[in-house]
Amino acid sequence: MIKVWDYLKEYELLREDILSAVDEVFKNGTLIFGPKLDEFEEKFSTYHECKYGIGVGNCTDAITIALKAFDIGAGDEVITTSNTAVPTVTAIVNTGASAKFVDINQYSLMDVDRLENFINKKTKAIVPVHLYGQMCEMDKIMEIAKKHNLKVIEDCAQSHGATYKNKKAGSIGDAGCYSFYPTKIFGAYGDGGFISTNNEKLYDRMKRIRFLGMEKKKMSSGHWNGKYYAVEHGTNSRLDEVHAAILLKKLPYLDEWINRRRQIGKRYNDELKNLDIELPLEHPDNKHAYYIFVVAHPDRDKIMSKLSKKNIHLNISYPWPIHIMDAYRHFVCSSCTCLTKTEEMAKKIFSLPMYPTLTDDEQGIVIKELKKLI
Ligand SMILES: Cc1ncc(COP(=O)(O)O)c(C=O)c1O
């Protein structure tokens, strides 16, 4: 069987390292907020060219925390795209703000030429989603944000290690938010998330919000160096020591794994280019990290079910744009015509197997079977 995603082969390769990392944490006696998290926060933010980093429970929390640290909440609007994973919007709505959706361009990314149409007095932030492993046009986004005094929180859940004009995902906006959900380019063995920033004040506030809005305060009795005291309302979202330790073992491989993804992407592009199928475009300013390899065909459901019978499993990310789902349709008007490209793509996109341990033979079978069908 060829899976659309698989972690078991990676685990086979790293098993001893991972188990020894877990054992080290268990023996060390600190399970939350310890030396592994400190080291990981330093190394992962440095990798993404940022001065500060905060490990959190997941990327949904990361985006919410970053927005809350800018006091974004009820009555405010945040602009993003609708062809994203639900959590991008969950995170915005968690703050009390409303989401506004811009249509996408030929790269399936925020169409920056339409962005300004959605800015009004209530707009406080933009959440560009670096979807499928490719970054949005950040120069234009930052220029528009500056002009209208908006914050930019990059959703990097799908784009660890990707670059735009040689700058890493998460290093350009006010903050970058990453997911370590197991399927991601850089996945944990459970949930995990991260926020990076170059802004020290923002870092301090996000760190406080991550941990129940608390800071250490001296007791008047003089006992203790400091006990936790809630300075503001926060949340509880922590990356634990076990996961920080596992991710530290994985980090040295990230570039190699992205290169392998790009190699797999190149082969798909080369060998499928003469078929009647839409292939993903890489923007000339970008280094695509190929979280997933998304193609489009009007008969995708037929193609998927035929390949599934041959034990080749494909996926759809995502079959429904956010703005048509019951939970969020109130963010657009009932006769909305602004999101035509988003809606058109959702009907025909699907993704091919893409992960560093996919073998050349397995990829060859996927290509051969697709050629037979299309
Ligand atoms: C684009 C995008 N944003 C945010 C998230 C949320 O990540 P997490 O599952 O870590 O909360 C995901 C994960 O599915 C995602 O793909």
Image: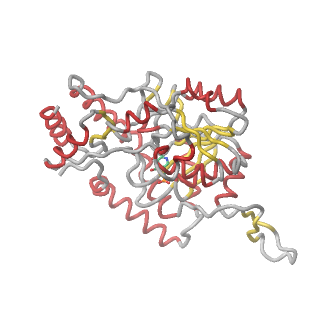
The mark total stands at 0
From this view, report whether residue 253 is shown above or below residue 237: above
Q: Residue at x 47, y 31 (%)?
A: 104
The residue lying toward the viewer, choosing from 301 and 210, is 301
From this view, report whether residue 75 is shown above or below residue 211: above
Q: Is residue 314 left or right of residue 104?
A: left
From this view, report whether residue 75 is shown above or below residue 265: below
The residue lying toward the viewer, choosing from 112 and 146, is 112
The image shows residue 299 at horizontal and vertical percentages of: 24, 36
Q: Is residue 182 left or right of residue 373?
A: right
Pick the quarter of the image with the C terminus.
top left
Q: Residue at x 62, y 36 (%)?
A: 173
The quadrant holding residue 358 is top left
The image shows residue 325 at horizontal and vertical percentages of: 46, 49
Q: In the displayed orientation, state which residue is furthest to the right.
A: 220
Q: In the displayed orientation, state which residue is furthest to the front.
A: 335
The image shows residue 89 at horizontal and vertical percentages of: 54, 48
